[in-house]
């Protein structure tokens, strides 16, 4: 076991170059707090920001709700210092936003789940904080109308900074505990956030609101308070831990215009295998967190869930999607990686692994069988 929990120094903050240099044990929220007084933020914003480390964010290329506008971790790292399994010290990338000298090893290491090298320092690219934020909460009578609204919103040139989807099972969970948060007739919900200058926000809000006015819309409410906007979404995660002994939590991604078909077929697959499920996620990226709820003490339910998941992954690949948007492969999904990556490509990836880690001592057994 290798712990980096004592590598918790912020080494430098450089507002002029919009850069912060950090050790891997610094928490995401600590980075946000450190740069906010300068008028900046670091865009990756996983819901675990209060306890997820920068090293962990880099290991999985973490995203979050605002990735729809600002991108994931890979888009906000300029360089890395790391140690390979053979003891070589690597310095990748550079201190500037432009640089094309040599191969891009920075992006190779980000998302590699600790299988190639141990990251000991990261040079992070900062972004100016938006001056103003506003948002909408839209409720729909069914998943199909909600999915069509997502496609319409993402077709706009002035898009949202966050676009979150909650299905009927998510809303029922919240409604059963906090009845005042969700209207009785609502079966799906969109949380839509926009940011920018004071002058452009009204037009952006009006355009997005117009895109939501399709068959199946029940209501749409304007909110200028971020706390109120995200109240329902923040209430959901704790509730999921209470409703089933185990949940299989996936984070598949499909092209946004495939969301209507994906969500419809997903429901059919779960019905076919009689597996309860709760779905929500970052709709603006097509990144849906599929939660299959099972009782591990029921062997037949375990086998049905495995078969259900297999078909869900086949559906994702058929729609030109990917098996993981931000959680990574680890051990849980390594048996399915062949569905997405062909043998020649896997062979090259394994040869890269062998080059960095010839004795397979870094996170052994992860990603590859």
Image: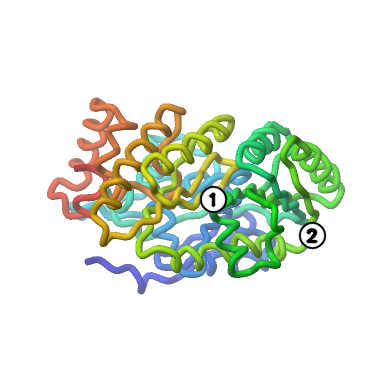
Q: Position of residue 259 (x, y in %)?
A: 55, 35
Q: Secondary structure at mark 1?
A: strand
Which callout, 2 or 1, points at the residue further toward the start of the chain? 2
Residue 91 in view, yes or no: yes
Rounded to the nearest angstrom, the CA distance separating label 2 from label 1 is 23 Å
**Secondary structure under badge 2?**
loop
Q: What residue is pinned by disc 2?
A: 224
Residue at x 75% of width, y 53% of height: 135
Say few, some or many: other residues with alpha carbon within 10 Å of mark 2 (under 14 / 14 to 19 / 20 or more): some
- The location of residue 246, given as percent across then percent down, is 35, 61
| Pair 2/1: label in front | 1
Residue 93: numbered disc: none
Answer above or below: position of 255 versus 48: above
Outermost residue toward the bottom in this view: 6
**Residue 304 spot, x, y in % from top left:** 30, 46
Q: Nearer the viewer, residue 245 or 136?
A: 245
Q: Is residue 110 left or right of residue 161?
A: left
Q: Which residue is mark 1?
A: 280
Residue 223: name its quadrant: bottom right
Badge 1: how crowded within 10 Å, few (<14), some, or many (20+)?
A: many
């Amino acid at each position: 076991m290798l712990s980096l929990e004592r590598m918790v120094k912020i080494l430098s903050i450089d507002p002029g170059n919009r850069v912060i240099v950090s050790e891997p044990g610094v928490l995401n929220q600590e980075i946000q707090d450190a740069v906010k007084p300068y008028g900046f933020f670091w865009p990756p914003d996983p819901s675990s920001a209060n306890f997820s480390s920068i090293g962990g964010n880099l290991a999985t290329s973490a995203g979050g709700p605002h990735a729809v506008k600002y991108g994931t971790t890979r888009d906000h790292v300029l360089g890395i210092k790391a140690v390979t399994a053979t003891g070589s010290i690597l310095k990748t990338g550079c201190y500037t936003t432009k640089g094309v000298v040599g191969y891009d090893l920075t992006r190779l290491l980000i998302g590699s789940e600790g299988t190639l090298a141990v990251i000991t320092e990261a040079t992070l690219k900062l972004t100016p904080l938006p001056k103003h934020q506003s948002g909408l909460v839209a409720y729909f009578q069914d998943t199909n109308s909600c999915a069509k609204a997502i496609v319409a919103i993402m077709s706009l040139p002035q898009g949202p900074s966050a676009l979150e989807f909650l299905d009927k099972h998510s809303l029922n969970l919240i409604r059963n505990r906090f009845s005042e948060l969700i209207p009785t007739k609502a079966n799906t919900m969109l949380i839509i956030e926009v940011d920018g200058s004071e002058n452009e926000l009204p037009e952006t809000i009006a355009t997005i609101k117009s895109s939501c006015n399709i068959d199946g819309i029940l209501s749409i409410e304007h909110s200028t308070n971020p706390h109120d906007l995200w109240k329902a979404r923040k209430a959901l995660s704790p509730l999921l831990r209470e409703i089933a002994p185990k949940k299989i939590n996936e984070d598949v991604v499909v092209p946004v215009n495939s969301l209507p078909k994906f969500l419809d077929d997903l429901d059919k697959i779960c019905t076919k295998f009689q597996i309860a499920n709760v779905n929500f996620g970052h709709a603006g990226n097509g990144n849906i967190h599929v939660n299959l709820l099972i009782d591990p003490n029921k062997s037949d339910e375990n086998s049905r869930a495995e078969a259900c998941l297999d078909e869900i992954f086949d559906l994702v690949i058929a729609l030109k999607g990917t098996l993981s948007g931000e959680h990574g492969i680890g051990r849980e999904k390594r048996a399915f990686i062949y569905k997405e990556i062909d043998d020649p490509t896997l062979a090259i990836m394994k040869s890269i692994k062998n080059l960095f880690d010839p004795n397979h001592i870094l996170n052994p057994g992860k990603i590859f069988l």
